[in-house]
Image (tube, rainbow, N blue to C red):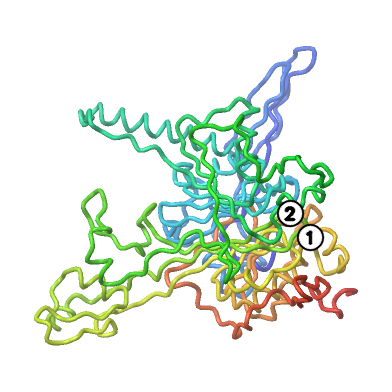
């Protein structure tokens, strides 16, 4: 079928297909086989039904192949296991996004609810975890053991109902990996009696109440965390945080004293040893939460022994394939979703990757291979071996790379200024497109969701290279509706960014050095057309007046 113009040049698109097995008649007689695709054989069953799920790859339609190539097309590919197409550069996982669920509210036939993975060269970050995420991961090239951090935007069910099952799945995968490692050591007689067991740790970040949600689910479902360490860090101090003064707003005793606040209270009855609770305070100057801020790379850092790994090699913290040792800037800020529902957006930015050095040119300048090469790769000038001259990085580097940046905006009706500042100049902006501009401003205010037009406008205003539309409503089930949403986003973007409609199992990889698409000069980000009235943001400026009734 014809695909959306924004992804019409993807090599493959995916959709699930269920094949119903042939069924014997009620009387027990033989059944005629049901039709099935080539290469499939039906399983004859008696007095029972059998189903089998297959992921089918759909090549682009002939009409899309003759259209003008899109600049973003070479960076889109399938994330399915077993699909290897050299043209899509499948081995490049330095900085790529895998979409596990792209629907809003409840899943549909072809879209699971919200979940997005950021693959970072051996390490994976997961953003939101809706119901069914564990099953979606089974189809992808994402190992459960590679997931090290999980970021929750808010506590609505379509963003957290798959969280506890995923924790238990990661724990099982970790146990199996440990068992396989021990069997391998026994086979080759490499087991050491003094070997120290390092249990894996999963870090989870989100709004207050996240720890209680996980702990209560584990306790009431009689599930145990007996191998995986889970550290839940709650981002506290925000404007929408539900404290004791807001009990009446959430129906906790109508403001009467003595009632517990379920989001911030401590319940010893549901505690478990390997589930830890931490708190992260807001940076009051920037009104953001700094989750990770690596040490700048300088001569002192490189000369120290901090970079020596277990294998004895020295790796810079900005190496793209450092795995769990890779250091990144991770920040969060609040979004305006619904009153009383604290919602966060996140940004992930890497340290600028090291450049490529011309070793022969460096030797000709009197610098033999040493730790100083690492400094030059990171843009730091050094002296030659006899300290008679200073060598600038521009003299020996053949190629340099800027840092890549990713911004994730979950459900919201507008973006406050602190979050807008974090999104500025991102390579990829994931923005919801739940509503259309045709729905009008009243629906935006009531439902707390944004429009595709605002998604395009945000990409232009924040100076983003690519805007990925996500969190589609159930009404966007057919391709014609998706095409309209994409066009609406393009109208708001005015050609400043590449617009992409996300699909389940679609993957977008960002090349080293980021995207170099032409875009307009970004306007100073101060939120999505927001106007401050004291501490309140006027939501009526979300949609241009001349577009409300179109």
- Which x, y percent locates residue 302? 25, 66
Picture layout, residue 307 above or below residue 44: below
**Residue 470, quarter of picture:** bottom right
x, y percentage for residue 352?
A: 40, 71
In which quadrant of the rendered image does the C terminus lie?
A: bottom right
Residue denoted by label 2: 341
Q: Is residue 82 visible?
A: no
- In the displayed image of the protein, which residue is found farthest to the left? 386
Q: Residues within 10 Å of mark 1 (few under 14, many from 20)?
A: many
| Contact flag, marks 2 and 1 (Cβ < 8 Å) | yes
Identified at 54% across, 71% down, the residue is: 427
> Residue 82 placed where, x, y %?
48, 46
Relative placement, left or right, of 356 versus 22 is left
Q: Is residue 128 above or below residue 134?
A: below
Is 38 placed above or below 111 here? above
Residue at 28% x, 60% y is 315
Residue lying at the far front in this picture: please name it. 257
Q: Name the residue under label 1.
A: 448
Residue 489 occupies which quadrant of the picture?
A: bottom right
Secondary-structure class at tag 1: loop
Task: Give the camera-side residue of 184 and 167.
Answer: 167
Q: Nearer the viewer, residue 492 or 326?
A: 326
* Residue 189 visible in this rendered orientation of the protein: yes
């Amino acid at each position: 079928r014809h695909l959306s113009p924004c992804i019409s040049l993807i090599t493959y698109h995916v959709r699930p297909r269920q094949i119903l097995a042939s069924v014997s008649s009620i009387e027990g007689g033989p059944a005629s086989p049901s039709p099935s695709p080539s290469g499939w054989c039906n399983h004859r069953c008696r007095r029972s039904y059998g189903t089998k799920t297959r992921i089918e790859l759909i090549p682009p339609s002939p009409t899309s192949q003759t259209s003008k190539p899109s600049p973003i097309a070479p960076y889109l590919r399938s994330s399915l296991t077993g699909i290897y197409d050299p043209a899509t550069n499948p081995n490049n996982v330095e900085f790529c996004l895998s979409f596990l669920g792209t629907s809003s509210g409840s899943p549909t036939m072809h879209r699971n609810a919200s979940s997005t993975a950021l693959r970072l060269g051996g390490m994976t970050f997961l953003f939101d975890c809706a119901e069914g995420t564990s099953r979606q991961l089974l189809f992808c090239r994402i190992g459960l053991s590679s997931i090290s951090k999980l970021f929750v935007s808010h506590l609505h069910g379509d963003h957290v109902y798959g969280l506890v099952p995923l924790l238990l799945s990661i724990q099982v995968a970790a146990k199996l990996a440990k068992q396989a490692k021990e069997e391998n050591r026994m086979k080759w007689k490499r087991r050491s009696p003094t070997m120290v067991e390092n249990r894996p740790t999963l870090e989870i970040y989100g709004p207050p109440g996240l720890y209680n949600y996980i702990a209560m689910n584990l306790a009431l479902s009689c599930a145990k965390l007996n191998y995986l360490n889970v550290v839940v860090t709650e981002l506290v101090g925000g404007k929408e945080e539900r404290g004791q003064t807001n009990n009446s707003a959430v129906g906790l005793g109508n403001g009467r004293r003595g009632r517990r606040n379920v989001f911030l209270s401590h319940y010893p009855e549901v505690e478990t040893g390997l589930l830890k609770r931490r708190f992260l305070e807001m940076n009051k100057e920037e009104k953001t939460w700094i989750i990770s801020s690596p040490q700048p790379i300088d001569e002192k850092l490189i000369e120290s022994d901090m970079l020596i790994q277990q294998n004895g090699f020295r790796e810079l913290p900005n190496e793209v394939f450092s795995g769990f040792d890779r250091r990144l800037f991770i920040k969060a800020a609040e979004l305006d979703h619904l009153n009383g529902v604290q919602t966060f957006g996140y940004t992930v930015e890497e340290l600028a990757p090291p450049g490529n050095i011309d070793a022969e040119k460096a030797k000709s300048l009197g610098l033999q291979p040493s730790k100083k090469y690492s400094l030059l790769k990171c843009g730091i000038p050094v002296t030659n071996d006899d300290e008679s001259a200073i060598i600038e990085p521009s003299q020996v580097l053949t190629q340099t790379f800027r840092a890549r940046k990713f911004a994730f905006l979950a459900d919201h009706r507008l973006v406050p200024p602190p979050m807008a500042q974090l999104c500025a100049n991102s390579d990829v902006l994931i923005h919801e497109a739940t509503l259309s501009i045709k729905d009008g401003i009243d629906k935006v205010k009531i439902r707390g969701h944004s429009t595709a037009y605002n998604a395009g406008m945000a990409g232009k205003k924040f100076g983003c290279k690519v805007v990925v539309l996500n969190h589609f409503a159930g009404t966007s089930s057919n391709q014609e509706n998706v095409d309209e949403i994409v066009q609406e986003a393009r109208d708001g973007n005015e050609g400043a960014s590449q617009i992409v409609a996300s699909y389940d199992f679609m993957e977008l990889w960002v090349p080293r050095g980021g995207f170099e698409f032409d875009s307009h000069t970004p306007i100073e980000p101060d939120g999505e057309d927001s106007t401050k009235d004291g501490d309140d943001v006027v939501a009526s400026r979300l949609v241009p007046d001349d577009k409300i009734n179109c």
